[in-house]
């Protein structure tokens, strides 16, 4: 990618980690904002925020290994634990020791360990429709996770491109906001059927399979407090329903919570102007 791309007008950069080559964008100057994406997307999901904020901040957005323009190494496990370790190495290699951390979806359990392990590095938290706990007491999420992570889910991921073609549009508040042009930018990354299993279905399996990892993060949730936090939640998200937001309210009682009534799972994709306004207020 290059700065001539109208939808993603950023310079592509790469760093060689011990586990593979990671792509990232690094735009602007000033206080650092580190954007961590979830699945099945890549740093493209943050393009609106980066374009709006790079005039006043240094905006850094990596692609997890296997996603976006990053390498897809054969010997990488693609679990959230592995992604979290790779991200921590990225942050170290980049020399980032003071930043606002923005996470969405699986970006929570992948990115929030940075705050748990290096609390002095994270000066502010911004959370979009995410989590970092096991689903022990959530029967609905457990049921969905068993289907998505099982044999049927694997087949659907591989042959139907389930997470991108079916799940992604379904968790928008208004599917028309996911235009064919924008949807294609996400679909293009996973035309390889085997990669859909190796990279995307690995995280579907991890919804339950990484239960102990999530439990370890949740046990340390007190380390997230003591810094400004903003939770921006798309209330029409049928995947991460408002009860997940309720759990965040208990973990971060001092956080500013903004409920976007007309947004789904990707508030920064569906209501970018509102999200940008909020970000500018808190940064």
Image (cartoon, rainbow, N blue to C red):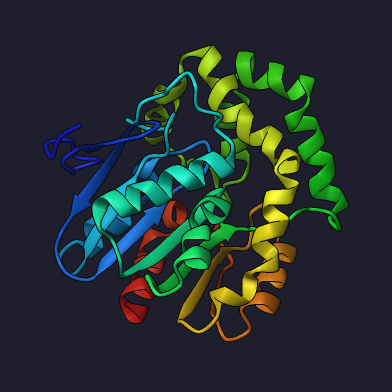
Q: Looking at the rendering, in which quadrant would you find the C terminus?
A: bottom left
Q: Position of residue 59 (x, y in %)?
A: 25, 58
Query: Quadrant of residue 155 in the image?
Result: top right
Q: Position of residue 231 (x, y in %)?
A: 53, 71
Residue 74 against residue 69 in the figure, above or below: above
Q: Residue at x 86, y 58 (%)?
A: 137
Mark count: 0
Q: Residue at x 44, y 29 (%)?
A: 66
Residue 193 against residue 261 in the figure, above or below: above
Q: Position of residue 119 (x, y in %)?
A: 46, 72
Q: Is residue 282 visible?
A: yes
Q: Residue at x 46, y 60 (%)?
A: 114
30 with respect to 165 (left or right): left
Q: Looking at the rendering, in which quadrant would you find the N terminus?
A: top left
Identify which residue, 252 or 265, lies in the foreground: 252
Q: Is residue 166 visible?
A: no
Query: Quadrant of residue 235 in the image?
Result: bottom right
Residue 283 against residue 147 in the figure, above or below: below
Identify which residue, 259 or 152, lies in the foreground: 152
Identify which residue, 7 or 130, lies in the foreground: 130
Q: Residue at x 38, y 36 (%)?
A: 182
Query: Quadrant of residue 199 in the image?
Result: top right
Check the image and name the residue furthest to the front.
18
54 with respect to 133 (left or right): left
Q: Position of residue 263 (x, y in %)?
A: 54, 58
């Amino acid at each position: 990618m290059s700065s001539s791309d109208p939808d993603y007008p950023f310079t592509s950069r790469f760093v060689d980690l011990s586990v593979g080559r990671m792509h990232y964008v690094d735009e602007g100057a000033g206080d650092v904002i580190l954007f961590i994406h979830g699945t099945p997307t890549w740093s493209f999901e943050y393009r609106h925020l980066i374009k709006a904020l790079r005039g006043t901040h240094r905006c850094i957005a990596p692609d997890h290994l296997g996603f976006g323009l990053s390498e897809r190494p054969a010997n990488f496990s693609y679990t959230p634990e592995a992604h979290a370790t790779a991200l921590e190495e990225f942050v170290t290699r980049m020399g980032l020791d003071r930043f606002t951390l923005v996470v969405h979806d699986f970006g929570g359990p992948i990115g929030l360990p940075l705050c748990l392990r290096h609390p002095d590095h994270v000066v502010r938290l911004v959370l979009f429709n995410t989590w970092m706990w096991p689903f022990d007491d959530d029967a609905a999420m457990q049921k969905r996770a068993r289907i998505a992570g099982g044999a049927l889910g694997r087949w659907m991921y591989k042959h139907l491109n389930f997470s991108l073609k079916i799940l992604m549009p379904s968790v928008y508040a208004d599917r028309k906001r996911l235009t064919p042009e924008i949807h294609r930018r996400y679909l293009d990354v996973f035309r390889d059927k085997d990669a859909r299993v190796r990279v995307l279905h690995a995280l579907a399996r991890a919804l339950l399979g990484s239960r102990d990892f999530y439990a370890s993060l949740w046990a340390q949730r007190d380390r997230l407090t003591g810094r400004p936090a903003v939770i921006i939640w798309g209330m029409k998200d049928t995947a991460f329903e408002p009860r997940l937001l309720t759990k965040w309210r208990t973990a971060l009682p001092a956080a500013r919570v903004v409920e976007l009534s007309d947004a789904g799972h990707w508030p920064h994709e569906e209501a970018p102007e509102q999200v940008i306004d909020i970000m500018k207020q808190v940064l």
